[in-house]
Amino acid sequence: MKDTLNCIIIDDEPLAQELIEKFVKRINYLSVLKIFDNAIEALDEVEKLRPDIVFLDISMPEMTGLEFIRTFTKYKPHFIMTTAHPQFALDGFEHDVDDYLLKPIPFDRFVRAVNKVRDRIPHKIESDKVGIEKVYPINKDVDEEEIQEEIDDELLDEGLIKEHYLWVKEDRKLVKIDFNEIVYVEGMKDYIKIFLDKTMIITYMRMSKMESVLATRKRFLRINRSFIINTKYMKALDGNMIELENGKKLPIGTNYRDIIKNAMKSQLP
């Protein structure tokens, strides 16, 4: 009986590496052997390590994930492709990959992909139980909310938050963002979009974490579950919609109406 499914992660985005590694640690029968920043570096190592599963990003410089798969002629591990570009899904399945995960990857979707691979591996871990936690036991010592908070804390530690600006991680780089230049923030599950006057930054972080950072800064106001606005850029209030100076119109959540009214009153001269 095989007690552990060994994995390697090949991705040129550090944030994606961190998230997949966190997910692997939540599952008792998965273990990370090694993490690679690019496919070329991983070529020789994969043959030596012989992992059961390879979490492989499709879009990488020098050698793409699909080019990497085509190098295997004899030994071939189980591939779970990861990418932010859904148009590549068909190419991945044509190369007989086991599953395809769209970034940012939800944990439940990750578990389904791993379970699919598990069922295809000879001498797989035996279990007569059913369901996500029973088919592939999840580490009971780790709470999912605690895991995400830990990820958030790593991605935005206190040293990156200053009085007038903060640093956030986008792909391989740290980006400096002036609080006054934030027009609005949009939450998208495990990541957020920070809209500035002329650009937009995407970073892995929960909306609640960003809200706690902005809570101590004046002018920022959460208007529904998905949006926080900078009232400095607010142009008009039209029924249940707020219009910003850039023309963007955002909906006001039912539970946030009184909060918005009180905040506006306090800011009026």
Image (spheres, rainbow, N blue to C red):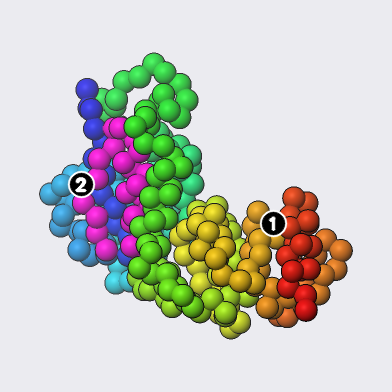
Quadrant for the N terminus, please: top left
Separation of residues labelled 1 and 2 (CA atoms): 42 Å
The amino acid sitting under disc 1 is Asn
The amino acid sitting under disc 2 is Leu
User: Quick one: label 1, few (<14), some, or many (20+) residues within 10 Å?
Assistant: some
* Residue found at x 66% / y 65%: 221
* Marks 1 and 2 close (CB-CB < 8 Å): no
Q: Which mark is residue 130?
A: none
- In the image, residue 5 lies at what x, y percent? 26, 36
* Residue found at x 77% / y 75%: 268
Q: Read off the magenta span.
A: 13-37
- Secondary structure under the numbered disc 2 in the rendered image: strand
Looking at the image, residue 69 lies above or below residue 98: below
- In the image, residue 148 lies at what x, y percent? 43, 48
Q: Which mark is residue 33?
A: 2
User: Quick one: label 2, few (<14), some, or many (20+) residues within 10 Å?
Assistant: some
Which residue is at the far right? Answer: 239
Residue bearing mark 1 = 224
For marks 1 and 2, give the one nearer the viewer: 1
- In the image, residue 242 lies at what x, y percent? 77, 68
